[in-house]
Amino acid sequence: MVLPDLPVVEAFPNGFLGVLLAERVFKTGLKLRRGKRFDWLYDRALATGVLSGVLLDQSWGDDSALREVEADHDTRARHEKRAALVCLLTAGFAHVGRATVLGDPGSRWFWLPPTTLWAEWARHGLDEAIARSRVRGFPQACTWRPLEL
């Protein structure tokens, strides 16, 4: 939801990570069942360096947060720390007004990283989805960037 007077942001970790990955990488995980997909996406985002790029984009300076999360050998705890980190990154982009927010007032809002960090296929897919929505009479189906949170 977008509540202009209340700084609440709902994160979508799978969506956040998915739009960052190259299409060929993303497509190899499409058949994973729910519950397995997040860690798979995170592993690919870590291995390809896109997570490091997100941290640099938010001026975190280095990969120490990633190393800290990965140092936990308890699989469940590592999963939770990974999810918390992606939620924190989502909130960071929202806080500085750079999150890409998709949806419409009558439905849900998806808070994602700025489109400047998205893989080309994801940016192209967004443009196509917006065009299709407008043709069907949904002029509000577009990206929304908050001026202030």
Image (cartoon, grey):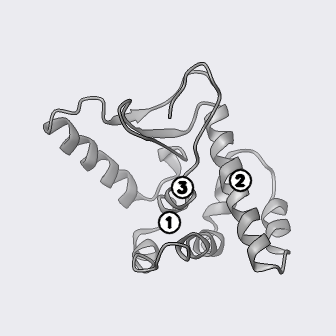
Q: CA distance from mark 2 to mark 1?
A: 15 Å
Q: CA distance from mark 3 to mark 1?
A: 10 Å
Which residue type carries mark 2? Leu
At x 70% / y 45%, what residue is drawn?
A: 58
Q: Are marks 3 and 1 in contact (CB under 8 Å)?
A: no
At x 44% / y 72%, what residue is drawn?
A: 26
**Residue 96 in the image, given as x and y percentages of width and height:** 65, 32
Q: Is residue 118 above or below residue 59?
A: below
Q: Could you classify mark 3 by the number of other residues whose Cα lies within 10 Å: few (under 14), some (14-19), or many (20 or more)?
A: many
Q: CA distance from mark 3 to mark 2?
A: 13 Å
**SS class, disc 2:** helix
Q: Left or right: where does residue 58 sit relative to residue 35?
A: right
**Residue 97 in the image, given as x and y percentages of width and height:** 59, 30
Which residue type carries mark 3? Phe
Q: Nearer the viewer, residue 55 or 69?
A: 69
Q: Which mark is residue 9?
A: none
Task: Tell me which numbered mark, 3 or 1, is placed earlier along the sequence.
Answer: 3
**Residue 8 in the image, given as x and y percentages of width and height:** 63, 33
Task: Tell me which numbered mark, 3 or 2, is placed earlier along the sequence.
Answer: 3
Q: Could you classify mark 1 by the number of other residues whose Cα lies within 10 Å: few (under 14), some (14-19), or many (20 or more)?
A: many
What residue did someone put label 3 on? 16
What residue did someone put label 2 on? 55
Q: Could you classify mark 2 by the number of other residues whose Cα lies within 10 Å: few (under 14), some (14-19), or many (20 or more)?
A: some
Q: Are marks 3 and 2 in contact (CB under 8 Å)?
A: no
What residue did someone put label 1 on? 21
Can you tell which quarter of the image residue 102 is in? top left
